[in-house]
Image (cartoon, grey):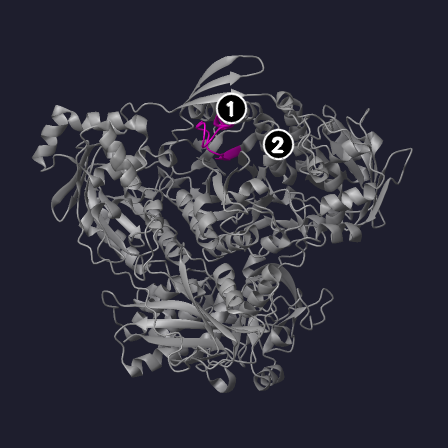
Amino acid sequence: MPSRLEITLKEDLFDAEGAAIRRKANDYFGYHVGSVRTIHILTIDMALTEEQLEAIQRDIFTNPVTQVSSYRPLDLDFDWTLWVGYRPGVRDNPGSTAVEAVEDYFKIRAKEGEGIYTSKRFCLQGADLSFEDADRIARELLANDTIQQWRVFSRKDWDPATGIGIMVPKVKLNHRPTVTAIAMGSDEELAEISKARNLALNPNDIPTIRAYYQREDVMAERRKVGLSSATDVELEYISQARSDHCNHNTFKGLFHYRDLATGEHQVVDNLFATCIESPTLTLKAKKPWVVSVLWDNAGVGRFNDDYHYVITGETHNSPSNMEAYGGAITGIVGVYRDPMGTGKGAKLIAGMYGYCVGPRDYAGALKPRLHPKRLLDGVIEGVRDGGNKSGIPTPFGQVWFDEGYLGKCLVFVTAIGLMPARVLGQPSEKKSTSPGDLIVMCGGRVGKDGIHGVTAASEEFSEHTPAGHVQIGDPYTQKKMHDFLMEARDEGLIAFLTDNGGGGLSSSIGESARFSNGCEVELDKVPLKYEGLDQWEIWVSESQERMTVAIRPEHEARFMALSKKHAVESTVIGRYTDSGKLHITYEGKTCAYVDLDLLSSRFPQWTFEAQWLPPEHRGLTEPVLGEPTDPEGVLVAMLARPNIASKEWIVRQYDHEVQGTSVIKPLVGRGRDVNSDAVVLRPVLDAPEGLAAAHALLPAYSRIDTYPMVACTIDEAVRRVVAVGGDPDRIGGVDNFCWPCIQYDPDQNPDGKYKAAQLVRANWALRDTCLAYGIPLLSGKDSMYVDGHLKGPYGETHKVSGLPTLQFTCTSVVPDITQCVTLDAKAPGDLVYVLGMTRDELGASEYYEHLGHVGLRVPGLHPEPCLACYRALHRAIRQGHVASCHGVYRGGLGVHLALVAMGSRLGMAIDLSKIPGSGGLRPHTLLYSESPGRFIVTVAPEDRSAFEALMRDAAFACVGTVSEGQDLVIGDPDRPAWIRLSVTRLLSAWKGPFGGLI
Amino acid sequence: MSRTDPHKRDVRALRVHINALIAGEASLESYDILVFDGGFSWGDDHGAGVLEAVRLKYNLGTALQRFIRDGKLILGICNGFQALVNLGFLPGLDADYETRRVALTFNDCGNFRDDWVYLAVDSASPCVFTRGISRLELPVRHGEGKFYASAETIGRLVEQGQIVLRYALPDGAPAGGKFPYNPNGSLDDVAGICDPTGRIFGLMPHPEAFHHWTNHPDWTRTKTLRKREGRPPADDPPAALHIFQNAVDYIKKQTA
């Protein structure tokens, strides 16, 4: 009989978790809950004696200073008690560590099927709450039905003797692993099978697959290993490898692009090759600091003579949209494995985040699965735990609110690693598998996690069905694996390593076997979380925290000893060969035997119709706006816009200083509360160099044209790293595209051709801007299908597509960290400069959005003068002539002058008529135009001539001074104080919307 | 710190895996200073530092008690402090290094928080790590840093000078519980305590994260203003480093 231990804080201790629930119940639903107390429950399903149970209660699970506990239900007062626990098969991290602690305490091993499960019980006081209210708190605040189950008890239903009862969410499959042979007599039959098994095979691929199995030589070889028809293991392998996720079929597709205004038509063959690969290879040839790009899990750039940095970015949109916390933590912990699995392995030094969600206060008629407020909370917490518990700083991130993301949220996660340039004299970025190398799986075990997703979602939930499609990352297991692999790398034990993410072993082994040209895998050796998985499930499971490593046989003993020291499970599950075959067996019997080159054989290219209609032909025009008579009101309102306002509450939840590398922090300035343009880390503590990093998002511009959207996004990310001291000639880029579906369908996707044209134009901008700025793309990913079908007020559904979005990340090396600058003006009397031209470019600006317009004149980038300006500015920063530097981004000069004033806690007097480009522009255009390429710089009077000499070829002007007082004063000779706002007033507006959140 | 050769007074910092100590691949006897650093040991499931303390206590308890008896130094930072408290090494009242008497529990603000804090140092404390330091600025980065103990225990800690560090206002006066100066709701603003001998010290803030003047949140401002006065960007290594230097000096003196 399992035992249930209830643990709670002593009565006089403040229950912060309970208080937060109480607050949210009020904020979200307007419920008045008197108090909430939290009880932590351990359901112990292990054969332990009563004495043993008492011992672990006393010595492990109860803190005598703060807690009380009992194996009987705790007698806390409540009107309603809500129990929330995981569904079977959901990763229960504290449950696993509890087992580990009990094993260690008694020096025993838990037997097969034994376990400890954690859950919580919340005791609510609130006489006014109805059952429906209590259930809503459980359903919408505490639990998510994809991963959790809950029960609601009223005081009168409560049996103080039995409490919640004994809930053991153990997975019981009672299934005998079976390989299924699949006959495919016709293309139609295979299409049916694909649908029934959720293989998602592209119809165009089906004839190629069938043709392979009908080849005489293939059939003869298969007979020798006892196979005839294709097996499910094989089809799953092919399906994974051919998926858009793994193969980027969209970006490698053939686009028929037609400009409907001019009638011009052109064929664009393979966006990846023409807009990403080719420019990057061109730039790599010119820039020796680019070490390794375009083939590995992440890109590699030189940091200094002794170290390389490694970077990539990912998204985890769909899972986060289903289960925000689980999706986000799995996303950040998952992307860490990319640098970890690049070359011979990189240590993680930073993570970054970008969230695109619906408005936090959305009150419209559509019903997203999770309200944006709850979704954002969950995503923030997921990345918080993933980053903080991994000991990796999370120093930079952004949030973008837009109703388009109600259909599907975007969760961007970026990871940066560091590796020595050489490992025992060998280049660290190189790796390969050779015949005879052992295939080792390290880290977590395999369960039904992440298998297809859809398969699990369409199954009825029963008490013991694993909730497979949504996972919860486990930073603890991964941290141990990370530390282990870094030691193994330094001892030269790793020939090859890669992570198990999308596609699981199928992808990691399938890809690594191409180096040696073959492999033999014994699936029965793979450690499982529970018995009963089919062979194909073991092969494609996406259970997290696993790496696949190739080691030479002579290193096996040492590798395993290190693994044991770090308490990491490592298992030899096969070996690499040069047979040309992917050969999989289970208990000695072959269940897959496929030529590795099948996947490089000619599958038909995906094709898309792309039709572009320029914005002026889509009916977009400039709004006819008169000048505001309350210009101060405008600025105050702009600062309080959700996409501009302070989001300090997110930043402070993230440990941005662990590893001791922090040089420029995410929040800077006198009050340490204004967002820095970029962050700078000093990853090698005894080297002078730093790594600057930032990213940018400007999806609003896609409403007009995705070309300037991409160009301006890249420019913003570039300026961000240049502003803190990054070298504009050593910038690396990471492109993360998130796009709605671009395949035209008259019913399901009637504007698919337009969306396809938007993607083509975005890629052209990526190519042109990267070439102009000299930015090699170190890494990048694309995530298509940012669409959702939301229920409306009458039960009808609406398709909601997200804005075409690019998150662009820039890194740059700072030659000497002590020369870095921040955005805050340092002293009264300093001169304020604006660099770069301001143009009449309010289209899709925050200002127009605030006034309810889109407009037409979207900001356009002129990269050549910009780059010259950035280089001159960089020289001025290096020579110490710049006291502060801040880029002008979303919201324009008005918002960003205010940010500089807030960061400084000093006033400024600004003359709008001096702003470069001001001729003929009205004040509100000057203040809110979002023209790229601009900076606000302050300079000490004594540095004036040196600074101006360095900048002489750029568009720049001194537009004012930093003042003694606390007022930001903006005007022109006619109206010297058109705007006068104190720093205090600016701060209260900017912190207004989210300042109360912690 | 390893005492490989007392005459050469060779000081080296080594990372030693807890499992290497348990397996006997490394021995506590070869070291003079033991530092438990920050992190989320065992994910901080079941309470911050709880499972680390359990693992240490039931696998290395005897060796650790001997380490204390031998007069060596122990420093616990953040998660390390939480582990020391759960091991009962702190506060070590009445030479009892086994009983848990104080706790570090969930922040009152309800969340993990990364921020720099001002700290006031009790100069009368016997703590060997803080000798000569009166004020500090350091980052805190924790979700469970609220110091909690009975009024009686806190009274005894005050009496014996064991409350080494208190969260303070910018002017150095105690924060008086005021958020965010006291970032977690710690009783009596406690940020760090030592045992009665001053040889065991635990603190929530991170001295190791202020090892260079460019770690400080105000460094760009300070550097710019000092430059205009013709001064170098910083005079001395950050005071936080004295915590480690004091420990090394103490051991050197003991073994001289």
Q: Amino acid at mark 1?
A: Ala
Give the class, few, some or many, for how many residues have Cα within 10 Å of label 2's Cα (few <14, many ≥20). many
The quadrant of the picture occupied by the N terminus of chain A is bottom left
Residue tagged 2: A701
- Give coordinates of residue A607: x percent, y percent: 40, 22
- Give coordinates of residue A498: x percent, y percent: 33, 42
The quadrant of the picture occupied by the C terminus of chain A is bottom right
Query: Does the magenta portion include A382?
Result: no
Query: Does the magenta portion include A737?
Result: yes
Q: Is residue A609 above or below residue A159?
A: above
- Give coordinates of residue A245: x percent, y percent: 38, 36
Q: Is residue A591 above or below residue A385?
A: above
Using the rendered image, report if marks 2 and 1 lie on a common chain: yes
* A431 relative position to A732: left or right: left
Q: Is residue B2 visible?
A: no
Give the class, few, some or many, for how many residues have Cα within 10 Å of label 1's Cα (few <14, many ≥20). many
Residue tagged 1: A757
Q: Mark 2 near mark 1, Cβ–Cβ under 8 Å? A: no
Q: Is residue A880 above or below residue A655?
A: above
Q: What secondary structure is marked by label 2?
A: helix
Q: Chain of mark 1?
A: A
Q: CA distance from mark 2 to mark 1?
A: 15 Å
First in sequence: mark 2 vs mark 1: 2
- Give coordinates of residue A326: x percent, y percent: 44, 54
Q: Amino acid at mark 2?
A: Tyr
Q: What secondary structure is marked by label 1?
A: helix
**Observer-nearest residue: A762 or A653?**
A762
The residue segment tinted magenta is A732-757
* A153 relative position to A537: left or right: right
* A812 relative position to A268: left or right: right
Mark carried by residue A802: none
